[in-house]
Amino acid sequence: MAQRYVDFTQLNLGRDQSIDDNFDEETNTRGWYWGNMTKEEVKEQLRDQPDGSFLVRDGSEPGYFTLTVRRRGVNKLVKIYCRNAMYGFSEPFQFSSLDELICYFRTHSLSTHNPSLDIKLLFPIEKATRDSFGDEAKKKRDYRDLIECLRIEETKLEILYEEQAEVQTELQKKERLAESLQETESIYKQQVDLHRQFHGEVSPVHIQSVRDNFNSLLDRLQEISDMKEMVAHDIGNITRSNRNVMGKIAELKPVIRKLARSKMKKKRWLVDMQLLPHIVEDTWNIGVCDRSEAIAKLCDREAGTFLVRKSLRNGVESYALSLATEGNVVHIKILEKETGYGIAEGHCDHPTLMDLVLQYEATPMSEHNAAIKETLQYPVRKCDIDDFYEDEPIYGL
C-alpha cells in the first residue's frame, strides 16, 4: 500500500536540535512507540489494520519522531518535532511530552493541524504484538479494548444509517413536492394560454377585470416557477448529503469487518484457554430464575461463582446478580437506566449486561458494597468449546 508524507511545517530543524534526553527506549512503557524501525517494518505492522491504527518510531534524523497513522487504507506519515523538551507538529510546540501529544490526539482529530487528516489516533499498534499477544492479563485487556473499539465503530455506523434514513426521507418529500409543482405549473400554463385565446373577444366593459385576472395568473405562475427552482436546489443539496453519508458508511464497514474478525479470533482463543469464559453469555445468563433456584445453584460452589437471572414481578421484568461468597449467596439488583446497566445509582453506564460482568470480573464488588470482597470470577455454567460459535454475525453488514 502506498505511503504519503504529510508534513505540517516547513521548519528547518538541524542535527543539533535533538530529542529529549530523558526519553529512553530501554525504559519505554509506551506500547505504540517502536524506536528504530524501517519503513518496510512499519508497512508490515499496519497492513490490513483499520483506519485510526497508528505507531510512533524514531525519525530518520535527530530532532523528530515519525507518527504513522492509517487513513482510508493508506499510511500517512507525520513528523513530530522536539525542541527545548517541547513536542508538536509545528511551532509553537504545545506538548511537554510525547505521551501528552499522543493522548491528546486519541480524542481530537489531526485535522486541527491538517484539514486533509480528519482522523483520530484510535488503535495503537503495540510493540509487544511484534512477537506475541502478551501475558494473560494483557490478553484480557486487549480483548476488552477491542470490544470497546468495535462498539464505538458500530455506534457510528448505526448513527450513519439513521442519518441516511432521515436524508432519504427528506429527499423523497422534496421529490414529491417537485412533482406536484410540475403538475401545478402545467395547469397554470394551460390557463394562461386559454386566457390569451379569448382576449380579443372581451368587451370594453370587462377588459380591466380580465387584465387583472390575467396578471394574477402570471404572478402565480412565477411564484410556482421560483418555488420549483428552490426545491430543485434543495434536492441537489440533499442528494450530495446522501452521497456523503453513503461514502462514510462504505468506509466504515471494512473497519467493522476487520475489528469483528479480530474479535472472533481472540474470543475463540480466550475461551479455549479458559482465560475469559465470561464472554460466552450463556455461561452466566440463565434466564428466568427466582432467588431460591439461584441459591440452589450456587450454595456449594466456590466463592466468586456467579449468575445473572431474570425476574418477573408484578409484570415488570428486571435482572439480578447472584454471587457465591464465603459461606453465603448474595443477591444484587441490577439497575437499568437510559444510560445503561449498573448495580448502584449514578453508576449505570454499562451498555450491556456483558459489559457489567466484564467490569466486575476485574473489579471487586466492594467498590459498592464493603461486605462483598469477591469479583465475578467463575460463571455458573461450563463452556462447551465444541459447541461454541461456528460463526458470529457482524453488526449491520
Image (tube, rainbow, N blue to C red):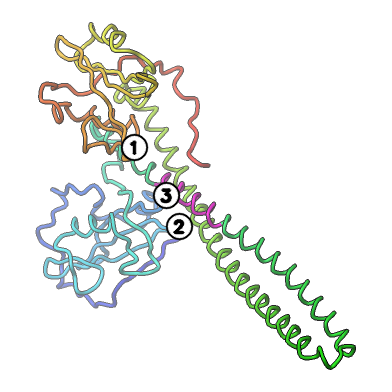
How far is the residue under mark 3 from the one under mark 2? 16 Å
Foreground of the two, 389 or 127 = 389
Q: Is residue 182 above or below residue 221?
A: above
Instruction: Residue under label 2, please give it.
Output: 72
Q: What residue is disc 3 on? A: 156
Q: Would you identify the image quadrant in which residue 119 lies?
A: bottom left
Q: Secondary structure at mark 2?
A: loop
What's drawn in magenta, residue-wise? 153-167
Residue ranking furthest to the front: 205
First in sequence: mark 1 vs mark 2: 2
In front of the other: label 3 or label 1?
1
Mark closest to the chain's N terminus, 3 or 1: 3
Which residue: 86% across, 90% down?
203
- Measured along the vertical axis of the image, is residue 154 above or below residue 106? above
Q: Residues within 10 Å of mark 3 (few under 14, many from 20)?
A: some
At 26% from the left edge and 36% from the top edge, which residue is drawn? 348
Q: Which mark is residue 153?
A: none
Residue 172 in the image: x percent, y percent?
A: 62, 58
The residue type indicated by label 1 comes to: Pro
Q: Amino acid at mark 2?
A: Arg
User: Judging from the image, what secondary structure is the residue with disc 3 in?
Assistant: helix
Residue 351: assigned label: 1
Residue 139 among magenta residues: no
Disc 1: CA contacts within 10 A as few (<14), some (14-19) or many (>=20): some
- Marks 1 and 2, Cα distance to the nearest angstrom? 29 Å
Looking at marks 3 and 2 on the same chain, the residue that comes earlier in the sequence is marked by: 2
**Quadrant of residue 169 in the image?**
bottom right
Query: Which residue is located at x 37 percent, y 69 percent?
Result: 115
Q: Is residue 286 left or right of residue 191?
A: left
Asked whether 160 or 388 is in front, the reply is 160
Q: Which is in the foreground here, disc 3 or disc 2?
A: 3
